[in-house]
Amino acid sequence: MKSCYFDRESRAMLDLHDVTAALPSKYEGVYDVWRISRMSVPPPSRGHGIAARLLQAACNDADAFNVELVLEAVADTSHENALNFEQLCAFYERRGFTHNPNMRGNMSRRPKESNALRTSG
């Protein structure tokens, strides 16, 4: 799985880090877990679906590699056309992320069964 997804034209990026080793042992062997540590789209390029494409590419790879994705939703309030917290959470929810009820903004997405996994065995 890649650790960075990049849109060359807009210079948008999504960074991930493997945090599997930091998890308690009770999670061992269930899924690898990668944290989306940053997704950034420059303000002039926002509203054109670039973040959605980067996130979808990461989700597709996570499904193929049986990886759970986790993130902390934090709204960028420094720009006029930025999503607020509720809009940002809805953006992630549309891509299969769910909320951790114990921590505001923490979200996760378990891998979907990939075609490769369905056809083997």
Image: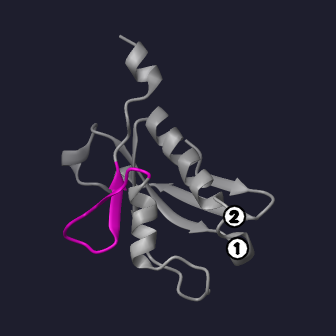
Q: Residue furthest top?
A: 121
State the residue in front, 87 or 113.
Answer: 87
> Is 84 positioned to the left or the right of 21 in the image?
right
> Is 42 positioned to the left or the right of 94 in the image?
right
The first of marks 2 and 1 along the sequence is 2
Disc 2 to disc 1, C-alpha distance: 6 Å
Please say if 104 is above or below 99: below
* Amino acid type, residue under disc 2 in the picture: Ala
Q: Position of residue 56 (x, y in %)?
A: 54, 48
* Amino acid type, residue under disc 1 in the picture: Pro
Q: Position of residue 31 (x, y in %)?
A: 33, 41
Location of residue 6 by image quarter: bottom right
- The answer to whether marks 2 and 1 mark residues whose Cβ atoms lie closer than 8 Å is yes
Location of residue 40 by image quarter: bottom right
State the residue in front, 118 or 4.
Answer: 118
Q: Please name the residue that numbered disc 2 is placed on.
A: 12
Q: Please name the residue that numbered disc 1 is placed on.
A: 42
Q: Is residue 108 magenta?
A: yes
Q: Position of residue 58 (x, y in %)?
A: 54, 47
Q: Is residue 37 magenta?
A: no
Name which residue lies at 45% across and 70% down. 88
Q: Which residues are magenta?
A: 95-109
Can you say which quadrant of the picture contains the C terminus? top left
Location of residue 47 by image quarter: bottom right
Q: Position of residue 43 (x, y in %)?
A: 69, 77
